[in-house]
Amino acid sequence: MSTDMIDINVGQHIKCVNPAHDIQENAMKVSRAQAEENRERILDNAAQLFRERGFDGIGLNDLMQAAGLTRGGFYGHFESKDDLAAQATRRALQANREQWKKQTDRSLAAWVKAYLSDAHRDRIGAGCGLVALAGDAARGAPAVQEVFAEGVENLVATLQDQMPAGGAAERREQALAMLSTMAGALLLSRAVGDTGLSRELRDAARKSLPAGG
């Protein structure tokens, strides 16, 4: 009998098993699963850290270290830092959309209040990617801007579903105005720090919105 083959015979030939092949195949499956897990971990960490520090505020060494990996493995997952920036931006804006959908389905007014709250203003890394990444996207590569535009459209569509009755064009216009007002107010309120002006900006934006009064 071959050293790497086992013949199982019960009156007739039933099966030929190659243990070495099975072990190799299982190892490859584990390896692929681990690679995908590593990639997801890099994206999750990058989506948070880019929101906190900006694209240029953190290097590849720190990004990979935050994911518990070494820089040497980076290019096995992404073509460049711009590629990671684009994919992390998509991840952040997808998370926005999922959260917004859940909250606005319950209550648009409550969502407006939460979005313009002190807590959200202070949670840059875990907060709205639209506001945190807009400046970087404006200076970023075309691939980043394309992803950002796609994310904005998705967020507008989510809000459009919650707008008062009217035609599609009218509801889209309302959604665009609401998104611009809220994102702008949050951005400026973060830029001026924890001051009375920060609260005034957000209060004025909230009162200007039909769902925020």
Image (spheres, rainbow, N blue to C red):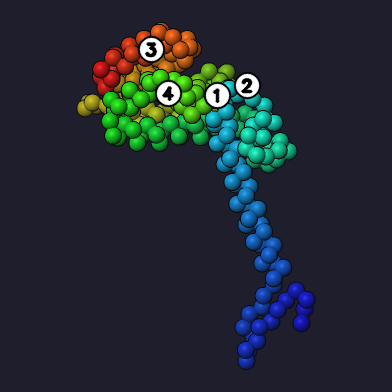
How far is mark 2 from mark 4, CA to CA?
A: 21 Å
* Of residues 51 and 192, the one drawn nearer to the viewer in this rendering: 192
Residue 193 visible in the displayed image: yes
Q: Earlier in the sequence, mark 3 or mark 2?
A: 2
* Mark 1: amino acid: Glu
* Mark 2: amino acid: Gly
- Give how far across and how far down residue 144 sits, in percent: 55, 27
What residue would you read off at disc 2?
57
- Give how far across and how far down residue 191 sits, in percent: 49, 12
* Mark 4: amino acid: His
* Mark 3: amino acid: Arg
Q: Nearer the viewer, mark 1 or mark 3?
A: 3
Who's the residue at 46% across and 12% down the image? 194
Q: Earlier in the sequence, mark 1 or mark 2?
A: 1
Whether label 3 touches label 4, CB < 8 Å: no
| 29 is higher (above) or lower (below) than 70 | below
Residue 188 visible in the displayed image: no
How far is mark 1 from mark 4, CA to CA?
A: 13 Å
What residue would you read off at disc 3?
199
Q: Where is the N terminus found, in terms of image quarters?
A: bottom right
Marker disc for residue 120:
4
How far is mark 3 from mark 4, CA to CA?
A: 12 Å
| 10 is higher (above) or lower (below) than 23 | below
- Give how far across and how far down residue 146 sits, in percent: 52, 27
